[in-house]
Image (cartoon, rainbow, N blue to C red):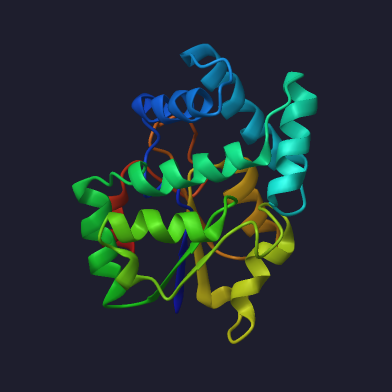
Amino acid sequence: MRKIIFDLDNTLIMHKEKYLKYYVKALEEFGYDANMDEAKKLYKSIGDYEKICNQYDYDGLMTFVNADLGTNYDVKLLERLNYYIGEYWYEMDEDAIAIIEYLANKYELYVLTNWFGFVAEKRLAKAGVLKYFKEVVGGDKVPTKPQKESFLYFTKDCDVSECLMIGDSVETDYVGATNVQMPVILYDYKNIYDDSYRRINSLIELKKIL
């Protein structure tokens, strides 16, 4: 094994309900309806865009959101959301930091996220771990997971068997990697899947495997 490729959200950085207050704050700044219900709708719609897009771009995403929600949000709202995500959505638990530090001594580490790569870089920098990653690849640079091209991006200088994907999503991380015959470990932190998947329940388990 040469390369370890991590998903970001709900793998290295877990989603927390408190983060949605920054959606409310951004909506308020632009004079839109600003409450937690509206924030949740916007958050869900942005997530739904991931299921149908080829790559992330501001205009395409905002066009989808406005059609989905019947709103007329300006694209600058998305720019503001990315600012807040980069500034405040970066808390990483001790196990995640410990496993990154451990694996960085043995492998090349990468992040593959369906969100904008520059935002992911900022979050990892705020968490103090960006220095351990050789590259952070976002859905604005490569086709979004589970498209084959996003995984094959990492095989330009090595065989697919030399890469390992680690992520929490069966649909995007596990299936996507499997479709290109890339080894993959499912981060089943909710312990809801069976042993038909190669899976772990905590990141620290990787010390026993890798």
Front residue of 6/163: it is 6
Front residue of 81/137: it is 81
* Residue drawn at 49 percent across, 30 percent down: 26
- Residue 129 image offset from top left, x and y in percent: 29, 63
- In the rendered structure, the answer to whether residue 188 lies left or right of residue 204 reads right
Please indicate, yes or no, whether residue 10 appears anywhere in the rendered image.
no
- Quarter holding the C terminus? bottom left
* Residue drawn at 43 percent across, 43 percent down: 85
Q: Is residue 46 above or below residue 148?
A: above
- Quarter holding the N terminus? bottom left
- In the rendered structure, the answer to whether residue 119 lies left or right of residue 153 reads left
- In the rendered structure, the answer to whether residue 60 lies left or right of residue 31 reads right
| Quarter holding residue 142 | bottom right
Front residue of 78/103: it is 78
Q: Is residue 191 above or below residue 155?
A: above
- Residue 203 image offset from top left, x and y in percent: 31, 50
Front residue of 26/146: it is 26
* Residue drawn at 67 percent across, 41 percent down: 75
- Residue 126 image offset from top left, x and y in percent: 29, 55
- In the rendered structure, the answer to whether residue 179 lies left or right of residue 23 reads right
Please indicate, yes or no, whether residue 81 appears anywhere in the rendered image.
yes
Q: Is residue 14 above or below residue 124?
A: above
Pick out the residue farthest to the bottom.
157
* Residue drawn at 48 percent across, 53 percent down: 7
Q: Is residue 115 above or below residue 50?
A: below
Q: How many numbered discs, if any?
A: 0
| Quarter holding residue 109 | bottom left
- Residue 14 image offset from top left, x and y in percent: 37, 39
